[in-house]
Amino acid sequence: MTRGPAGAKDRAGDPFQVVTLTDSPAHERLLEEFYRGLYWEAFSAQPEPLEVWKRGLRGELPYRQTIQLVLDGDHIVAGLTYERYPRSNCGIATYGVVAPRVRRHGLGQWLLADAVAALYAAGVRMVFGEVNDPRLPRADDPGRAAAWARLERYQRWGWRVVAARYVQPALGPDRARDRGLLLLARPDAAPPPAELDGAIPRAFVEELYEVTEGGPPDEEIGFPDRVPLIELTR
């Protein structure tokens, strides 16, 4: 267990603690609590099966999974999951959530930055992420505003939109492909470059589909030889 970002403390003045989960019985309890609590509240529309996470922590999947939780005493107040894919040598930050009562402590930004640093330290070529596309029609204005706010946060933190069609593969046998997401990239450079070698996201998405669905990517996906990395604005 390690301390969270410098200066981030709970209301009693104690620092938040960060736990990187393993397949130990004690951590299995934390994993299930996080999955059925904060994670489910944020991602119940397209959840990844809990058993997949458990297999990942046991080392039974063809990619390496990391799950980090932030604790305030005995309570889970934030979490992030990320993965490293060996064949394409790319990483992806998959799910991040912070409890409303501890937002504005910098926990989300710190968890993402720590994951990005760890992935690049392990030698990946690129780190990717996914967010809802805020330009798509939504049932309510608050939903669209929240999607814009999330994307804008990522862009402030150095992430850029991969300007090419992306479709998330089905995350389980009873799940559907998600056609409402943007693929993001977090280059290991500041400022981020204006474009990316299209072979990198192409190889990553091919491996992602092979691992999740056992087949080729969705036919709508296409990456040119040079893919612009852009910032979107409202």
Image (cartoon, helix red, strand yellow):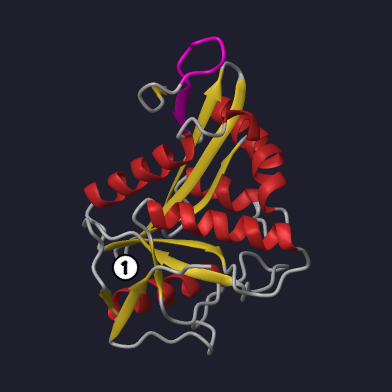
**Residue in the foreground of this view, choosing between 160 and 215:** 160
Question: In which quadrant will I find the N terminus?
Answer: top left
Image vertical order of residue 96 relative to residue 135, above or below? above
Q: Position of residue 15 (x, y in %)?
A: 45, 17
Residue that label 1 marks: 87
Q: Position of residue 119 (x, y in %)?
A: 30, 50
Q: Main secondary structure of the magenta part?
A: loop
Identified by mark 1, the residue type is Arg
The quadrant holding residue 196 is bottom left
The number of numbered discs placed on residues in the rendered structure image is 1
What is the span of residues highlighted in magenta in the rendered image? 9-20
Q: Is residue 22 visible?
A: no
Q: Position of residue 152 (x, y in %)?
A: 48, 57
Looking at the image, residue 38 sits to the left or right of residue 232; the answer is right
Please, which residue is most extreme toward the right here?
139
Please, which residue is most extreme toward the front here?
234
Image vertical order of residue 176 relative to residue 93, above or below? below
Q: Is residue 13 visible?
A: yes
Looking at the image, residue 18 sits to the left or right of residue 132; the answer is left
Q: Is residue 96 magenta?
A: no
**Residue in the foreground of this view, choosing between 138 and 110:** 138
Q: Residue at x 70, y 46 (%)?
A: 40
Image vertical order of residue 20 relative to residue 17, above or below? below
Q: Position of residue 225 (x, y in %)?
A: 28, 87
**Residue in the foreground of this view, choosing between 119 and 133:** 133
